[in-house]
């Protein structure tokens, strides 16, 4: 049955199995930073594409998301959305031309953001460790020294990487006591969605204004020595793996196939599944008519009505710069201030002021009544 293997099972060559140990960089890098935040990064285990984590330099901060953050009352502005903030209010779920309002509070001001201890990445680490233990036992039973050395080196490599890459995240705290404007912010996403966040200045400083710096446990020089050590371990591990017996190569190949598949699946999970953000409480405000609108003008008007301010619109240049639009913005601010959003006692939903914003904009753009009837 195995004639097609040219000589049978005993002569089958699987030297290429070493390549399986270095495949899957994309899936590993997808959650590389949060995985090294967890203590499970020290766990000896098989890890697909470990070379993806052996870098000459480490990220100094978490990767931001495209968007514009504007202080609704403070006047501050940032050209990106911080990583933790974007995950916390699930900005990816906002469709185009939508306006959402959330309220963020924090019960324990000393609580820190950390990796989720029981998240998918933890189970991946346990799975990899279990694979390592199983292969060590099989190598001893089969009296395969090369397989044993390969498994030990490739498993301990993850620990070496963890020592060099372990870091902690400490969000900046506001230390001043002087009076400041409300901390509410408006996030403007490129696809025309608005997210209004109601929070105090302390939370705004943590999530939106302060940089998310990665504080590593070891200095950069030590890290480079560790990276060199890890590179050598990887090379020798692959060499020993190529000289292991066919039986153990098959077991190791199967282990890496399973691990690669598992890492690809986990890479597709939402980012929020990997972070412990329980120190923050996010409540979504419910408005009559929902959150999705037909056009950009309507979503902009809803955001103005919620914030009762147009200063953030001018600062961020969210609206076109023209006389007609400036007049429309002033009118929108007047309507929002004189008729704030109110909660309906029957439905419990917040209602927007009644104002024909489209007709108002048309009149400001073309003030000739006769022309409006054309």
Image: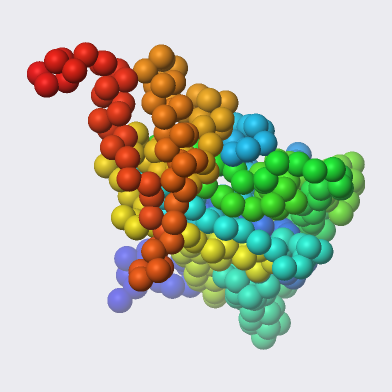
371 vs 77, left or right, is left
In the image, farthest residue toward the front: 338
In depth, the one of 4 and 165 nearer the eye is 165
Quick one: quadrant of the N terminus?
bottom left
In depth, the one of 232 and 317 nearer the eye is 317
Q: Can you see residue 114? A: yes
246 vs 56, left or right, is left
Q: Residue at x 59, y 39 (%)?
A: 72
x%, y% of residue 286?
Answer: 42, 61
x%, y% of residue 256?
Answer: 54, 65
Q: Can you see residue 151? A: no
Q: Residue at x 89, y 41 (%)?
A: 221
x%, y% of residue 162?
Answer: 77, 59
349 vs 132, left or right, is left
Quick one: quadrant of the C terminus?
top left
126 vs 288, left or right, is right
User: Measured along the vertical axis of the image, is residue 117 above or below residue 68?
Assistant: below
In the image, farthest residue toward the left: 374
Residue 150: image quadrant is bottom right
User: Measured along the vertical axis of the image, is residue 51 above or below residue 259?
Assistant: above
Label tally: 0
Q: Residue at x 49, y 61 (%)?
A: 284
In depth, the one of 36 and 56 nearer the eye is 36
Colouring used for the render: rainbow
x%, y% of residue 56?
Answer: 76, 39
Q: Residue at x 25, y 30 (%)?
A: 359
């Amino acid at each position: 049955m195995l004639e097609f293997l040219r000589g049978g099972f005993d002569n089958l060559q699987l030297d290429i199995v070493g390549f399986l140990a270095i495949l899957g960089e994309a899936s590993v890098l997808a959650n590389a930073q949060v995985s090294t935040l967890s203590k499970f990064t020290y766990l000896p285990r098989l890890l697909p594409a470990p070379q993806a984590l052996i870098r000459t330099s480490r990220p100094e901060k978490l990767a931001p998301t495209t968007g514009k953050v504007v202080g609704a009352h403070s006047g501050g502005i940032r050209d990106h959305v911080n990583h933790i903030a974007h995950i916390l209010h699930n900005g990816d779920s906002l469709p185009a031309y939508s306006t959402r309002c959330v309220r963020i509070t924090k019960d324990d001001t000393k609580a820190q953001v950390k990796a989720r201890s029981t998240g998918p990445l933890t189970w991946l680490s346990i799975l990899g460790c279990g694979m390592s233990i199983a292969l060590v036992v099989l190598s001893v039973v089969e009296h395969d020294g090369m397989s044993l050395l390969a498994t030990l080196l490739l498993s301990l490599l993850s620990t070496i990487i963890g020592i060099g890459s372990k870091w902690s995240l400490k969000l900046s705290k506001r230390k001043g006591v002087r009076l400041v404007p409300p901390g509410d912010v408006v996030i403007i996403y490129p696809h025309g969605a608005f997210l209004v966040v109601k929070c105090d200045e302390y939370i705004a400083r943590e999530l939106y204004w302060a940089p998310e710096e990665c504080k590593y446990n070891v200095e950069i020089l030590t890290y480079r020595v560790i990276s060199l050590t890890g590179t050598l371990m990887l090379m020798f591990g692959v060499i020993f793996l190529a000289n292991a017996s066919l039986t153990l190569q098959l077991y190791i190949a199967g282990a890496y196939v399973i691990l690669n598949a598992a890492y690809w699946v986990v890479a597709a999970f939402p980012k929020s599944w990997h972070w412990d953000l329980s120190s923050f409480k996010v409540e979504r405000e419910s408005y009559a008519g929902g959150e999705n609108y037909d056009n950009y003008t309507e979503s902009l008007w809803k955001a103005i009505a919620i914030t009762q301010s147009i200063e953030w619109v001018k600062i961020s240049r969210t609206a076109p710069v023209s006389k007609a639009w400036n007049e429309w913005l002033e009118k929108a601010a007047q309507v929002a201030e004189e008729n704030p959003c109110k909660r309906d006692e029957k439905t419990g939903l917040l209602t927007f002021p009644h104002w024909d914003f489209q007709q108002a904009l048309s009149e400001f753009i073309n003030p000739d009544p006769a022309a409006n009837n054309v």
